[in-house]
Amino acid sequence: MKLAKSLPILLSAMVCTTAFAAADNFNRTALGSNWVSLIGTSAKIADNKYTSDGAAYTKFTPAAGDNQATVTIALTRQDLGHYGGVFVGKASLKLRPSMSGKYFDAICFEPTVLSGLNTPGKCYTVSNHDITNFAKARVTLRTAGSTAFADIDTNADGVPEWSFSYEFGAALGTGAGLLGNTNAVTQDNLKTSLSN
């Protein structure tokens, strides 16, 4: 009798839980066979973190069916005009440094380069008072249908300082990876999942 009463609660907890399906902590010297270059060949591991020496879109093959990715993105040195980010399906989320190159001052939703989507995307910026400057964040990007959702946690307390969404107007799909165009930005501790 106790089992019958507990079963609906147990099933409810199982349905609402997001389990991480794949992860990479980059604690090695080379990306390896789980990473496939979609654009550029400069993606690499340096100091146990993902980075690149030029434009790089790199797919994480164990995450092919996942619609959520969480990664720590950090600005490691002053460098103008560069970015680091994460993508899920046809949606990407880029963190862009300020003109001083010391902090990130823009969080931008954009279609991935190979998506074929014709949408301008949307940036949330310091100048528009959407966010404040930060140099490191734990970023989660999730897709559901044609909408992308982002959570940005800049003080490592597990609670996002900002949450944003953007409607792309077309199904975004699954699959996750990382992108960037400079070794001044690093990504670390990637976790992906299939989220409700």
Image: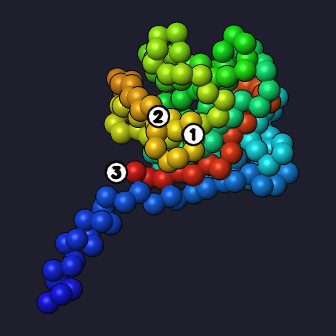
Q: Quadrant of residue 51?
A: top right
Number of numbered discs visible in the structure rendering: 3
- Give SS at disc 2: loop
Residue picked out by circle 1: 155
Image coordinates of residue 177 in percent, x first then y, are 61, 41
Could you tell me if residue 175 is visible in this image?
A: no
Q: Which comes before the other along the chain, label 1 or label 2?
A: 1
Q: Are marks 1 and 2 in contact (CB under 8 Å)?
A: yes
Measuring 67% from the left and 22% from the top, which residue is drawn there? 103
Relative image position of residue 81 (x, y in whole percent): 71, 14
Up/down of 45 relative to 92, above or below: below
The span from disc 2 to disc 3 (Cα, nearest Å) is 22 Å
Q: Gap between marks 3 and 1, in whole Å?
A: 26 Å
Q: Amino acid at mark 2?
A: Glu
Q: Earlier in the sequence, mark 2 or mark 3?
A: 2
The residue identified by callout 2 is 161
Element under disc 3: loop
